[in-house]
Image (spheres, rainbow, N blue to C red):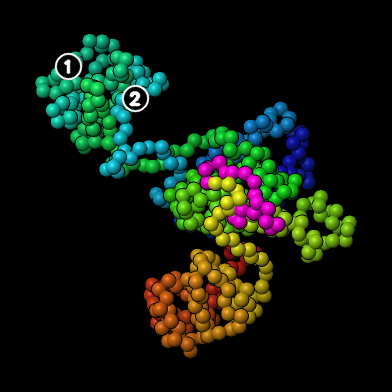
């Protein structure tokens, strides 16, 4: 998508035309992506520095109700050999819905949770930065403690920052406890006096005794297991050369088969920021490339026993240089030998199969180990992969129920993509998919029989009713169990899946 001339400031008319086409191309796809997002869904887009500004403005325009966060990912620590500056990173936009409180962006904290389910946080500031009295004088004061019951009772009066002889010892029956470290240095508490008093009154300050000293902790009753991510990621595992290009080459045993694949672990961490707390998330990548997103999803599931599903969409485009060589040999699109050089057949499909199975088609095992203590590449993953060919159908054929076999995989995916999707080879009054959770009613005359069979299958979540009449559809649904999801075929199918129209945007 980079059609600018980088070696000078002049951009000719042809390049301007190409760039306008790129913007139109991206806008259309961002608008389509927005339609596919769930209310708590997050859109992640990565881009290099050449178009980051244009993409940011486009995202703000199309997704005004989303909060945009930009993360810099160092994916090439050595830097490229470009003029003036060596580019060493790319940018990731995280587009998060502002109205959804359940959207959690973060990484797990390394915290210790007690047997009571609470987190204990040390009350005195530690470390060398901003932890001394001179750094935060307002956070140097005494907490009043009853040593008999080991309970905090309140905070003492404020101490001026230039006062050296502050009161110590007892205040009545209570003991003054200052944030003094083991070496006698005057440190500070983590909170100013007003906030500390609230925690004391709420009973959230825990006092223990260790080696004759009183230790102060704050009890976190509802610990947040996540911490905020920084906006610059510099991890050795994000190196696109080592864990992108070299990894794909090692898996496929081919060189130069795909340009600039992303690091498996950079994609994993992008997904992890959003779906860590969503073990059943659905992840869609409609520019699948080499299939890194599916590989990363498998890795996430292996890390926490999740059941996340990943949908990849790609074409089977042949590299321009390779295509020219094939043309000279008299091979053109549609020819099996031409198509086998396409990105899907030569990269995406093979990588997906190999990493899940742990071996190649010739039964040779994949070499190497994952960085996450998940195991070796040869171990594979406990996942299933299905490949579907997306093509155009005659709408009239679909409307008259003559292409039902072709759309069955879509019904299976709507129902959650569980179990089997192979339905009857010929038209039947109804069928209830074995091992899956969807059913289809094709004949109103068999409604009573279908109803009886549906009651025997409480696992059926989606029911598709074939009719071209809204009135008939509503009457039939009214007689079926209420705790199912119903859809009307085929009119709804034609409306919902119509493409290349203005309404699609």
Picture coordinates of residue 218 (x, y %)?
28, 33
Q: Residue at x 31, y 19 (%)?
A: 181
The residue located at (34%, 15%) in the rendering is: 134
Q: Is residue 377 magenta?
A: no
Helix, strand or loop for disc 2? loop
Q: Is the stretch drawn in magenta largely helix, strand or loop?
A: loop
In the foreground, 49 or 260? 260
Q: Return the residue at label 1.
A: 169
Asked if the residue under mark 1 is in contact with the one under mark 2, i.e. CB atoms within 8 Å, the reply is: no
Observer able to see residue 273: yes
Residue 451 circle label = none
N-terminal label among 2 and 1: 2
Q: Is residue 425 above or below residue 285?
A: below
Note whether residue 25 is visible. Answer: no
In the image shown, does 427 or 94 lie closer to the viewer? 427
Label 2: which residue?
A: 125
Residue at the (39%, 49%) spot, across then down: 101
Crowding near the residue tagged with mark 1, few <14, some 14–19, many ≥20 C-alpha atoms within 10 Å: few
Direction from residue 187 to residue 417 in the image, left or right: right
Is residue 217 toward the left or the right of residue 16 in the image?
Answer: left
Q: Residue furthest bottom?
A: 445
Q: Which stretch did the figure color magenta?
A: 356-374
């Amino acid at each position: 998508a980079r059609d600018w001339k980088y070696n000078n400031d002049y951009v000719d008319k042809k390049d301007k035309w190409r760039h306008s086409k790129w913007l139109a191309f991206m806008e259309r796809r961002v608008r389509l992506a927005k339609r596919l997002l769930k209310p708590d869904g997050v859109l992640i887009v990565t881009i290099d520095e050449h178009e980051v500004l244009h993409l940011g403005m486009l995202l703000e325009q199309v997704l005004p109700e989303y909060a945009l966060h930009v993360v810099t990912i160092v994916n090439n620590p050595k830097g490229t050999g470009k003029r003036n500056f060596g580019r060493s990173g790319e940018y990731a936009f995280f587009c998060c819905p502002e109205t959804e409180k359940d959207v959690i962006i973060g990484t797990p904290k390394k915290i210790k949770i007690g047997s009571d389910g609470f987190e204990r946080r040390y009350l005195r500031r530690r470390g060398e930065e901003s932890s001394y009295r001179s750094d935060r004088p307002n956070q140097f004061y005494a907490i009043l403690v009853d040593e008999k019951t080991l309970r905090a009772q309140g905070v003492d009066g404020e101490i001026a920052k230039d006062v050296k002889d502050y009161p110590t010892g007892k205040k009545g029956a209570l003991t003054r406890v200052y944030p003094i470290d083991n070496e006698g240095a005057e440190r500070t508490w983590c909170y100013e006096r007003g906030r500390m008093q609230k925690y004391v009154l709420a009973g959230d300050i825990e006092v223990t005794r260790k080696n004759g000293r009183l230790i102060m902790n704050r009890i976190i009753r509802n610990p947040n297991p996540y911490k905020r991510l920084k906006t610059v990621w510099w991890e050795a595992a994000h190196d696109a050369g080592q864990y992108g290009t070299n990894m794909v080459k090692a898996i496929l045993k081919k060189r130069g088969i795909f340009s600039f694949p992303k690091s498996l672990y950079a994609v994993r961490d992008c997904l992890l920021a959003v779906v860590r707390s969503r073990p059943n998330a659905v992840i869609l990548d409609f520019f699948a490339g080499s299939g890194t997103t599916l590989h990363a999803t498998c890795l996430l599931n292996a890390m926490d026993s999740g059941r996340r599903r990943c949908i990849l969409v790609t074409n089977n485009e042949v590299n321009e240089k390779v295509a020219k060589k094939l043309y000279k040999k008299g091979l053109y699109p549609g020819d099996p030998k031409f198509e086998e050089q396409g990105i899907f057949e030569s990269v995406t499909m093979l990588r997906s199969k190999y990493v899940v199975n742990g071996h190649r088609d010739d039964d040779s095992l994949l070499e190497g180990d994952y960085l996450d203590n998940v195991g070796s590449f040869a171990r594979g993953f406990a996942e299933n992969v299905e490949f579907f060919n997306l093509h155009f159908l005659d709408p009239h054929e679909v409307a008259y129920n003559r292409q039902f076999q072709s759309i069955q995989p879509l019904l299976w995916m709507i129902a959650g993509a569980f179990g089997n999707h192979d339905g009857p080879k010929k038209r039947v009054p109804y069928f209830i998919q074995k091992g899956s959770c969807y059913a289809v009613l094709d004949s109103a005359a068999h409604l009573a029989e279908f109803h009886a069979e549906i009651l025997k299958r409480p696992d059926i979540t989606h029911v598709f009713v074939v009719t071209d009449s809204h009135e008939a559809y509503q009457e039939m649904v009214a007689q079926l169990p209420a705790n199912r999801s119903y859809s009307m075929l085929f009119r709804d199918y034609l409306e919902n899946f119509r493409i290349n129209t203005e309404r699609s945007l």
